[in-house]
Image (tube, rainbow, N blue to C red):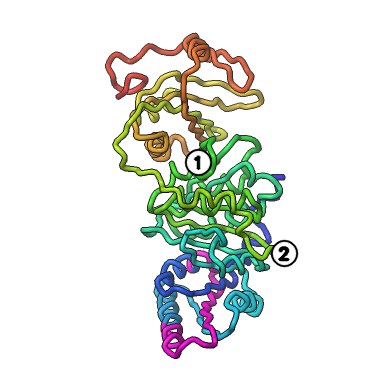
């Protein structure tokens, strides 16, 4: 049930950043981990740093570990937060992290991840051990090629069901914290089929919602850039892990990926069986964004204005015409709706549908008139002759409702704006 997904006033929101435990294994990961911890911690919260060494570790390793703690504490000070580090010597690295989160009463564990999965591990043996036994939420981050300046929150229909609501709740809490005191924008990306309405708390995170009906990793591939942080909600289920780990890591190779896992102890000794169907794709190369092939793409873009919105169909068309030639402009009022939906087909030349969506999405995102709107993108493979004829007559069939729209204007002979642009 969607109503369980509430951000404002939830029990977790005040306490999620009370005590963040940050295990440090790789000195190169200290700065990105501390940056995220500083964004997530409460104003009066604490950051606890931990490095675990085995008993047979040489003296040089201990010296390096303490030096790493000093560097991390210095970085924290530069970021305006306080962090305290400790180095522990134990046989079991994973169990020591679990013991420490209980001893320090941590509210969140922040872990660095290389972004690769194997045939035996999902996040790696150590992280899998912690995830499968942690009693507190976890944020697992793969650092991107660049610092991030936007948060992208993909939401599928599964996240709006009871099984996915806890993962969405955690991701929403993290998203709200990442944006505190900054001008960093947040994009809400719906994927899959539309069904239930998004909770108001989710809508409040961004100023508009983009919808791509494809699978989550396909939609993220079209939307995510090198300076994005992709915040992936996940529940401890087969489909949830597949969607948020291997597939998203492959779909957004340059972006920062933050996987939000709200879990308690499980009986699984390894998470790998849950991800086995996805591992077949793990070694598949990412699409080449510079490939020379270009083709004609037709995108059907549907805009659902916000409540009380005053954007007119011709305004929507002018915005879409900045990215390509527009045609088949429509407006209709679905049953029970007081606001008109607007739809148009955008014809443009691009290497693939992802690049086409990216171009149109940029124009839509930059348009102040569409603040608060929900925008859907559908790739039109082959125009349906019957539908095209109905559209030419000013009639459209939408979700089973036959609706008279209006007569469509003739193509602008001047070539300026409207259906004749570009």
Residue, x 50% and y 68% (percent of image)?
37
Callout 2–callout 1 Cβ contact below 8 Å:
no
Q: Position of residue 179 (x, y in %)?
A: 48, 57
**What's the distance in space between the residues labelled 2 and 1, CA to CA?**
40 Å
Mark 2 vs mark 1, foreground winner is: 2
Image location of residue 168, percent across then percent down: 62, 52
For label 1, the residue is 208
**Where is the C terminus found, in terms of image quarters?**
top left
The quarter of the displayed image where residue 255 is located = bottom left
Could you tell me which residue is drawn at 59 percent across and 83 percent down? 91
Q: Is residue 215 magenta?
A: no
The stretch in magenta equals 38-67
Q: Residue furthest left?
A: 414
| Helix, strand or loop status at disc 2 | loop
Residue 64 lies within the magenta run: yes
Q: Residue at x 66, y 53 (%)?
A: 237
In front here: 243 or 149? 243
- Left or right of 110, for residue 320: left
Q: Which mark is residue 267?
A: 2
Q: Residue at x 60, y 58 (%)?
A: 272
Q: Is residue 398 above or below residue 350?
A: above
């Amino acid at each position: 049930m969607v109503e369980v997904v509430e951000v404002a006033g939830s029990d977790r929101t005040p306490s999620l950043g009370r005590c963040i435990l940050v295990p440090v294994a790789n000195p190169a990961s200290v700065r990105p981990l501390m940056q995220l911890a500083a964004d997530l911690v409460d104003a009066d919260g604490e950051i606890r740093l931990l490095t675990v060494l085995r008993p047979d570790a040489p003296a040089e390793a201990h010296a390096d570990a303490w030096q790493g703690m000093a560097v991390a504490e210095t970085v924290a000070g530069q970021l305006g937060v306080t962090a305290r580090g400790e180095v522990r010597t134990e046989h079991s690295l994973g169990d020591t992290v679990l013991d420490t989160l209980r001893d320090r009463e941590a509210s969140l564990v922040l872990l660095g991840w290389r972004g690769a999965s194997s045939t035996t591990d999902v996040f790696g043996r150590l992280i899998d051990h912690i995830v499968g036994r942690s009693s507190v939420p976890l944020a697992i981050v793969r650092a991107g090629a660049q610092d991030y300046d936007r948060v992208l929150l993909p939401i599928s229909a599964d996240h709006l069901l009871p099984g996915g609501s806890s993962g969405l709740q955690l991701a929403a809490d993290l998203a709200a914290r990442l944006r505190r005191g900054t001008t960093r924008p947040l994009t809400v990306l719906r994927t899959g089929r539309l069904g239930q309405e998004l909770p108001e708390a989710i809508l409040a995170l961004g100023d508009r919602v983009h919808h791509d009906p494809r699978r989550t990793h396909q939609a993220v591939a079209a939307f995510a850039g090198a300076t994005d942080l992709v915040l992936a909600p996940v529940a401890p289920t087969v489909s949830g892990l597949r969607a948020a780990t291997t597939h998203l890591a492959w779909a957004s190779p340059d972006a920062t990926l933050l996987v939000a896992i709200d879990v308690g102890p499980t009986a699984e000794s390894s998470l790998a069986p849950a991800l086995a169907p996805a591992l077949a794709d793990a070694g598949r190369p990412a699409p080449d964004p510079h490939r020379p092939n270009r083709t004609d793409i037709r995108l059907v873009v549907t805009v659902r204005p916000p409540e009380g919105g005053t954007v007119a169909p011709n305004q929507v068309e002018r915005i879409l015409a900045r990215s390509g030639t527009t045609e088949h402009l429509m407006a209709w009022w679905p049953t029970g709706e007081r606001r008109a939906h607007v739809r148009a087909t955008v014809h443009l030349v691009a290497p693939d549908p992802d690049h086409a969506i990216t171009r149109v999405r940029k124009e839509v995102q930059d348009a102040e008139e569409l603040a608060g709107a929900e925008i859907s993108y559908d790739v039109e493979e082959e125009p349906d002759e019957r539908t095209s004829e109905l559209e030419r007559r000013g009639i459209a069939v939408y979700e089973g409702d036959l609706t008279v729209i209006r007569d469509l204007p003739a193509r602008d002979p001047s070539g300026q704006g409207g259906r004749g642009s570009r």
